[in-house]
Image (cartoon, grey):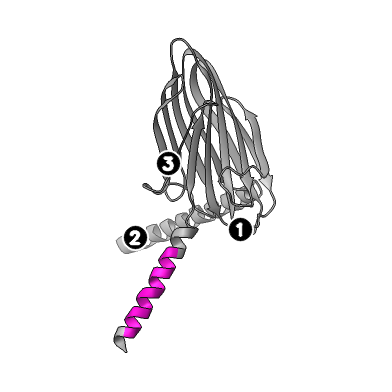
């Protein structure tokens, strides 16, 4: 009986582990110059997908996408792309880098998504677009969050509660000339709704006052003991 019970428990745990592996959020990364496409995922390093190599006239292409479980959570999205690219001395071109993560969970309240891009550029420039998609497919573009963001630009967009799971995707398009290079950091994050910020501030103030009251009480007790 104990052997049978142990076997059933082991089978149940194995099935649960298999389900968890299938349900785990996944990160997908692609980079393409229009002729050659490379791809990576986070199967070997959960939370990070990366590529380091050449793509056409881009002699250096270092792409790193970071998401859950390295940063953020299924209910608190954070997706970050770090990209460094350098073109040859005779030609450049267009490089499109796409980063996507699936498995974000249903929301019961509205979400405020912040999309932003910053970088350093030489003979190059970049734009960024971001999306969420309730089909929860990699690189889904069901709902536009931001489009055409340029260097040091950001966009805030509030969306109604989402029936999940859903995916997030950011697409960075780099246009480069000869001897060009670019170092870019772009991200999508979930931020507190403006309406919740006063509540957060009130909570912090209450904690501060509580701490001050406790400190004053301890001080009075110390004075009384000394007296």
What residue lies at 54% left-to-right and 50% top-to-bottom? 102
Q: Nearer the viewer, mark 2 or mark 3?
A: 3
Answer left or right for 113 relative to 86. right
Q: Secondary structure at mark 3?
A: strand
Distance Cα–Cα, label 3 vs label 1:
24 Å
**Nearest to viewer (mark 1 / mark 2):** 1
User: Which residue is located at x 62 percent, y 51 percent?
Assistant: 196
Main SS type for the magenta part? helix
- The image shows residue 143 at horizontal and vertical percentages of 68, 44
Q: Quadrant of the C terminus?
A: bottom left
Please tell me whether residue 127 is drawn above or below residue 27 in the rendered image. above
Q: Which residue is mark 2?
A: 222
Q: Secondary structure at mark 1?
A: loop
Q: Which mark is residue 49?
A: 3
State the mark number for residue 32: none
Please state the horizontal and vertical placement of residue 204, each as a whole percent of the image: 53, 52
Q: Residue furthest top?
A: 90
Q: Locate residue 71 relative to residue 131 in the image: left or right.
A: left
Q: In the picture, residue 215 is in which quadrant?
A: bottom left
Task: Find out whether the residues at labels 1 and 2 contact each other: C-beta distance under 8 Å.
Answer: no
Determine if residue 65 is in view. yes
Q: Nearer the viewer, residue 20 or 70?
A: 20
Q: Quadrant of the N terminus?
A: bottom left
> Which residue in the protein does label 1 denote?
106
Is 14 magenta? The answer is yes
Q: Is residue 52 magenta?
A: no
Looking at the rendering, the stretch of residues picked out in magenta corresponds to: 4-18
Secondary structure of the residue carrying numbered label 2: helix
- Tag 2 or tag 1, which sits nearer the N-term? 1
Q: Quadrant of residue 153?
A: top right
């Amino acid at each position: 009986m104990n052997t049978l019970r142990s076997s059933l428990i082991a089978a149940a745990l194995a099935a649960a582990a298999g389900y968890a592996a299938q349900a785990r959020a996944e990160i997908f990364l692609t980079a393409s110059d229009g002729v050659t496409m490379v791809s990576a995922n986070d199967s070997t390093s959960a939370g990070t997908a990366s590529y380091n190599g050449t793509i056409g006239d881009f002699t250096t292409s270092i792409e790193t996408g970071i998401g859950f479980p390295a940063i953020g959570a299924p209910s608190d999205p954070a997706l970050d792309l770090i990209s460094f690219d350098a073109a040859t001395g005779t030609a450049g071109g267009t490089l499109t880098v796409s980063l996507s993560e699936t498995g974000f969970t249903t929301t019961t309240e509205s979400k405020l998504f912040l999309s932003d891009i910053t970088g350093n550029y030489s003979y190059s420039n970049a734009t960024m677009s971001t999306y969420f998609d309730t089909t929860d497919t990699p690189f889904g573009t069901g709902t536009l969050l931001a489009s055409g963001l340029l260097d040091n630009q950001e966009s805030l967009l509030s969306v109604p509660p989402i029936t999940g799971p859903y995916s997030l995707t950011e697409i960075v398009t780099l246009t480069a000339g000869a001897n060009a290079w670019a170092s870019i950091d772009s991200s999508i994050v979930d931020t507190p709704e403006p309406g919740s910020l006063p509540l957060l501030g009130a909570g912090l103030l209450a904690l501060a006052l509580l701490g001050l009251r406790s400190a004053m009480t301890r001080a009075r007790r110390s004075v009384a003991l000394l007296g």
